[in-house]
Amino acid sequence: METRHPVQHTSKETSAMSTSSTGAVAKARKDIQAESGASAILTFLRRWGTILVIILFGVFFSLMSPYFGTVSNFNNILFSMIVSALLSMGLTYVVAAGSFDLSIGAVVTTTSIITALLIPSIGWIGATVVGLGAACLIGAINGILVTYGRLSGIVTTLGVMFLLGGVNTYLSGGYQIPVDYNEAVFRFLGQGRVGPIAFPVIILVAVFVCGYILSTRSKAGHYIGAVGDNPMAAYYSGISVYRWVIVSFVLSALFSGIGGVLLTSISSSAQPVGGQGYLLEAFAAVFLGATILGKGKPHVLGTLLGVFFLYMVSSGMNMIGISFATRQLFNGFVLLAAVGANAALNREEIHLKFI
C-alpha cells in the first residue's frame, strides 16, 4: 500500500499564502470602511438633507435679493403662512393615522362664513365657538364615514368638500361677507401686533406648541401614530382604531377652523371660496415635513418647517421676478419629490390604510 505523506510547504509558499491572506483582509477592511462611510453619509442626508436644502435656498435668495434676508421679510413670511400652517398641522394627524382629508380648505371657508355671519348677532366669542363647533362636527362626520361607513377617505372628504362648497355658496350668496369691526378684540386677533410681532404669529406658535405636545407627549398622539403604522397591530394591542381615526379627522377640522377664524379677522371679511387655495400647500408641507430629521413619518414640527420652506421659496421667487404660475409648479414638484423621498426613507411605498 502506498504511503501518503502530508504536503510540505516551502517557506516561500507559506510566505506567499500569508501575504495573500493579509491582502484579502486589508481589502475587506477597506470595503467595510467604504460601506460604513457611504452609510454614514446616507444617514446624515436622510436626517439633515431637507434642512440643508432649506438653508441653501435661503442663502441663494439672500444673494439674489438684498431684501430677502431682512427681519421685515422674515416677519412677512411668518404672517403669510399662518392659515396654511394651521391647515397643514391639522392634516398631519389624518395622514399620520393613515388617511387623507381633502375637505380642509372647505372647512376653512365654512368656519369663516359662519363666524362672519354670526358676529353681529351673538358677538365674536359666540360666533367663534359656533364656527369651531361646526368645524369639529364636519371632522367627526368625515371620520365616522371613513371608519364605520367603510368609505374611502379620499372619496369621502372629496364629497364633503363639494357639499360644503354648495353650503358656503348658499350661506354667502356667492358674495364676500364684510365683518363689522365694533368687535375690537376680534380685529386684534388677526391684525394686532405685540411689538414687532403680528399677533396671529403668536397664535400660530401657541397652536404649534399645543399640537406638538399632543402629538409627541400624549396618549392621543401615540395612538394615532400606532393606527397609521399598523392598524391591525394597534387593534390587537387594545387600541380603538376607529376612535382614533375619528379623532384625527376632528383635530384636522379644528385646526382648519382656527385658520378660518383667523382668516376672517385678518381679511376683515369671509370669502365664499377663501380656503380652497391652501389644499395643495398643506399636502406638500405634510409630506415634505415627513422627510425632515429623517423620520419618514408625518410630524408637526416637520410640517411647520415644510410650510415655512414653501412660503420662503415663494417669497424669494417673487422678489426675483418669477411668476405665480411657476411658483405653483414648484409646489407641485415639491409634493411629488416629498412623496418619493418618503418612499425612499421607508424603503417601501407609502400605504395609507384609510384612503
Image (tube, rainbow, N blue to C red):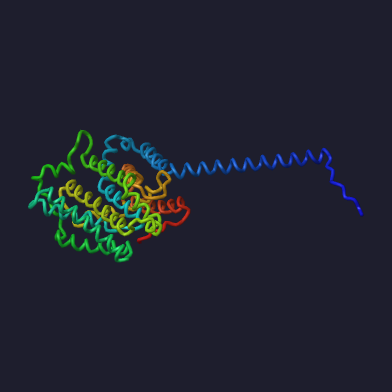
The C terminus is located in which quarter?
bottom left
Can residue 183 be seen? yes
Instruction: Judge left or right: residue 100 versus residue 137.
Output: right
Residue 72: x %, y % from top left: 27, 36
Residue 165: x %, y % from top left: 22, 61
Q: How many marks?
A: 0
The N terminus is located in which quarter?
bottom right
Can residue 321 be seen? no
| Foreground residue among 165 and 90 | 90
Q: Quadrant of residue 207?
A: top left
Residue 106: x %, y % from top left: 24, 57
Residue furthest out toward the top: 195
Q: Quadrant of residue 49?
A: top left
| Foreground residue among 236 and 337 | 236
- Report the residue at 23% width, 49% height from top: 259
Q: In the figure, 107 relative to 32: above or below?
A: below
Residue 234: x %, y % from top left: 38, 56
Q: In the figure, 152 relative to 270: above or below?
A: below
- Report the residue at 32% width, 66% height from top: 150
| Foreground residue among 307 and 319 | 307
Instruction: Judge left or right: residue 35 versus residue 94.
Output: right
- Report the residue at 22% width, 39% height from top: 198
